[in-house]
Amino acid sequence: MARAFSAGRRGISAHLEAAERDLLRKLFADIVTMLEPATPAHTDPLAALIGLDMDVSVPRDPALLRLLPDAVKNDAEASLEFRQLTERSVRENKIAALRAASLALESEKVVLDEEAARLWASALNDVRLVLAERLEIRSEADAEKVHQVQDWSHAEDVDSYLSLVYNFVTWLQESLVQAMLSNLAARD
């Protein structure tokens, strides 16, 4: 079983079993696939440099919309304009964080420096957002219901399995954030 992230002299580290690392690799890869743009980057070098993408649209998949939400509530036109200016670079940054996190899973002991920890926190957050959408977590009551699922031997359907995965990723992210906060406190 995994040991939570903890802060140390060499950075933030955790021990993850092979099955846990494989699960995280698959989750990270699934989210990367979800985030990869359907169209190639703009052929205009300046547009590509700044991330301008006039071909974007509001994601139809609710989980992808959770990762790439509208910027302006109740204003579709302003949200689309903002999406055209930022979505490609947001996608690329998220993909980079997910790939960097996946690369750190080569050995049982995962050791992260400050930047890698930040990328991991981002990657775990994106996984949690997608899982929360798939589990239809909309309220504290929904979250509590998901957190009640604790035993892998009782995972009999997709929702109970996803609940266990969500709980594992949540626990891992919480331990990572606590370790990051410990590092910050140690510097002061």
Image: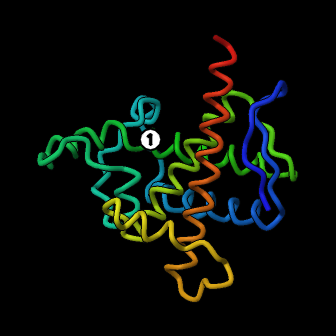
| Residue 51 in the image, given as x and y percentages of width and height | 41, 36
Give me the residue at 43% from left, 63% from top: 132
| Residue 160 in the image, given as x and y percentages of width and height | 53, 79
| Front position in the image: 99 or 161 | 161
Tag 1: amino acid: Val
- Reply above or below: 59 against 177: below
| Front position in the image: 53 or 128 | 128
Question: Which picture quadrant has residue 149?
Answer: bottom right
Relative side of 80 to 93, left or right: left
Q: Which residue is mark 1?
A: 90
Relative side of 100 to 34, left or right: right
Question: Which picture quadrant has residue 10?
Answer: top right
Relative side of 77 to 167, left or right: left
- Reply above or below: 113 against 106: above
Quarter of the N terminus within the rendering:
bottom right
Give me the residue at 78% from left, 51% from top: 3
| Front position in the image: 21 or 82 | 21
Number of on-image labels: 1
- Reply above or below: 129 against 164: above
- Reply above or below: 124 against 86: below
| Residue 66 in the image, given as x and y percentages of width and height | 37, 55
Relative side of 180 to 20, left or right: left
Quarter of the C terminus within the rendering:
top right
| Residue 7 in the image, given as x and y percentages of width and height | 75, 32
Give me the residue at 66% from left, 48% from top: 99
- In terms of secondary structure, where does tag 1 sit? helix
Give me the residue at 69% from left, 43% from top: 100
Protein image colouring: rainbow
| Front position in the image: 24 or 14 | 14
